[in-house]
Amino acid sequence: SVRRFSQIIRRLLNSRSIVIVTHNMDFVADIADRVIALHSGSLVFDGAPRELFRDANRVAEIGLEMPTLSQILARRPSTPEYLRDSISLQELEQKIEKKSAQTHKV
């Protein structure tokens, strides 16, 4: 159902702005282009998801969790450097495809 909801939101984003309230950081990483985070009734962050997820400590202080993919990549020391900052599966796939295309050009 989350996948279906994401598809609907993506279609709607082409024509309007949408406000979604969630604690699901996987969904945020996948769909949001702006995050506004509140903690104890105060605004603590306003910016791109990538900016928020650069600092796992800040995310924890806000009371949220890093996206699952970010957690997995952080635990795997064998993860190639160019993939380490990926926050969604869509972004990870794009980076792999781009790297593959560059490798095949050589």
Image (cartoon, helix red, strand yellow):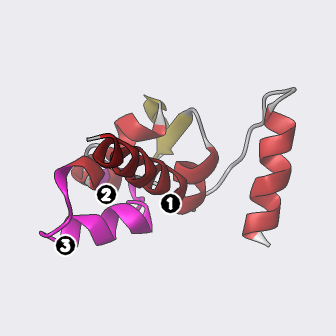
In three-dimensional space, the C-alpha distance between marks 1 and 2, rounded to whole angstroms, equals 22 Å
- Few, some or many residues within 10 Å of mark 3 (<14, 14–19, 20+): few
Q: Which residue shows up at 68% across the image and 49% down it?
A: 21
* First-in-chain label (2 vs 3): 2
In the rendering, which numbered label is found on residue 76?
Answer: 3
Residue at x 34%, y 48% (from the top left corner): 104
Q: Earlier in the sequence, mark 1 or mark 3?
A: 3
Question: What residue occupies the far left of the structure in this picture?
Answer: 77
Residue shown at 63% from the left, 47% from the top: 31
Label 2 vs label 3, nearer the camera: 3
Q: Residue at x 50, y 42 (%)?
A: 38
Q: Could you classify mark 1 by the number of other residues whose Cα lies within 10 Å: few (under 14), some (14-19), or many (20 or more)?
A: some
Q: Position of residue 54 (x, y in %)?
A: 28, 43
Residue 103, above or below 24: above
Q: Position of residue 5 (x, y in %)?
A: 81, 60
Within the image, what quadrant is residue 2 found in?
Answer: bottom right
Q: Nearer the viewer's eye, disc 1 or disc 2?
A: 1
Q: CA distance from mark 2 to mark 3?
A: 20 Å
Q: Secondary structure at mark 3?
A: loop
